[in-house]
Amino acid sequence: SAVISQKPSRDICQRGTSLTIQCQVDSQVTMMFWYRQQPGQSLTLIATANQGSEATYESGFVIDKFPISRPNLTFSTLTVSNMSPEDSSIYLCSAGDGGMNTEAFFGQGTRLTVV
Amino acid sequence: GDSVTQMEGPVTLSEEAFLTINCTYTATGYPSLFWYVQYPGEGLQLLLKATKADDKGSNKGFEATYRKETTSFHLEKGSVQVSDSAVYFCALSEINQGGKLIFGQGTELSVKP
């Protein structure tokens, strides 16, 4: 199994600013994903982070608001741009091996509050 | 598209009671099914999984059986403990999606002593 570390674990940010969340995996993984969990809600996939190319975004999420980088097979970042209080959520990174084993592992999440 | 539906919570039980959390799914392919648990203030942990019909996943006294005929994956535990209080998520992943998950709404479980 993969161990995933996310930084920061929580932050309180002013509206209009941006926050970059880092996700580090302890082994090379094929697939990395970013999810959002709004208060009291389930997890919604934001995008698939692709190594060496642009991320693949789900409906309702755009690159200008959630730019994602993935420079190698163990690291990814998600930026939440021009934040508003509606962006207050838990953001979770996950990783999978991309093969027949469809299991995914999760980081502890980043609890973001925008004031 | 694929989707997962869970019974609504919160569910409140007394310690040692029997637990069932219902989960049904719709999928175009032949997905793997998962239960994840989120303890207060923490991230998601995989609780159990099943990858084909009639498989039973089990862990920490929890069980779920992949029922293709009823498209269900209900979570059960014979005797819950206070420490089981958490939010439980049912999820699926298609076999060619590499771990990309579709989640149910989550069911909050509260176990009272």
Image (cartoon, rainbow, N blue to C red):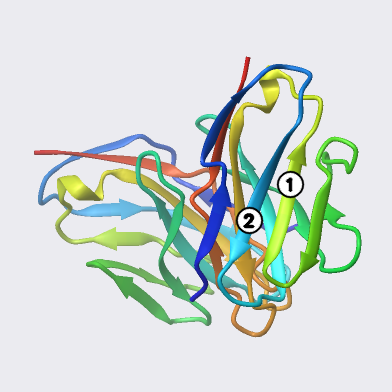
Q: Position of residue B63 (x, y in %)?
A: 31, 69
Q: Residues within 10 Å of mark 1 (few under 14, many from 20)?
A: many
Element at badge 1? strand
Between residue A86 and residue B65, name the one nearer to us: A86
Q: Position of residue B105 (x, y in %)?
A: 53, 43
Q: Residues within 10 Å of mark 2 (few under 14, many from 20)?
A: many
Between residue B58 and residue B73, name the one nearer to us: B58
> Distance from label 1 to label 2 (Cα)?
8 Å
Asked if the residue at tag 2 contacts the one at tag 1, i.e. Cβ–Cβ closer than 8 Å, the answer is yes
Q: Position of residue B70 (x, y in %)?
A: 51, 67
Element at badge 2? strand
Examine the rendered structure and indicate whether residue A96 appears above or below residue A114: below
**Residue bearing the label numbered 1:** A78
| Residue sitting at x 48%, y 50% | A108
Examine the rendered structure and indicate whether residue B93 appears above or below residue B109: below
What's the residue type where badge 1 is placed? Answer: Leu
**Residue bearing the label numbered 2:** A23
Q: Is residue A101 left or right of residue B2?
A: left
| Residue sitting at x 26%, y 44% | B85
Quadrant of the rendered structure where residue A13 is? Answer: top right
Q: Is residue B46 left or right of residue A115?
A: left
Instruction: Output the chain of dot 1.
Output: A
Can residue B82 be seen at all in this image of the molecule? yes
What's the residue type where badge 2 is placed? Answer: Cys
| Residue sitting at x 15%, y 50% | B81
Instruction: Output the chain of dot 2.
Output: A
Q: Quadrant of the C terminus of chain B?
A: top left
Q: Earlier in the sequence, mark 1 or mark 2?
A: 2
Q: Position of residue A87 (x, y in %)?
A: 69, 27
Q: Is residue B57 left or right of residue A72?
A: left
Quadrant of the rendered structure where residue A114 is? Answer: top right
Can residue A58 be seen at all in this image of the molecule? no
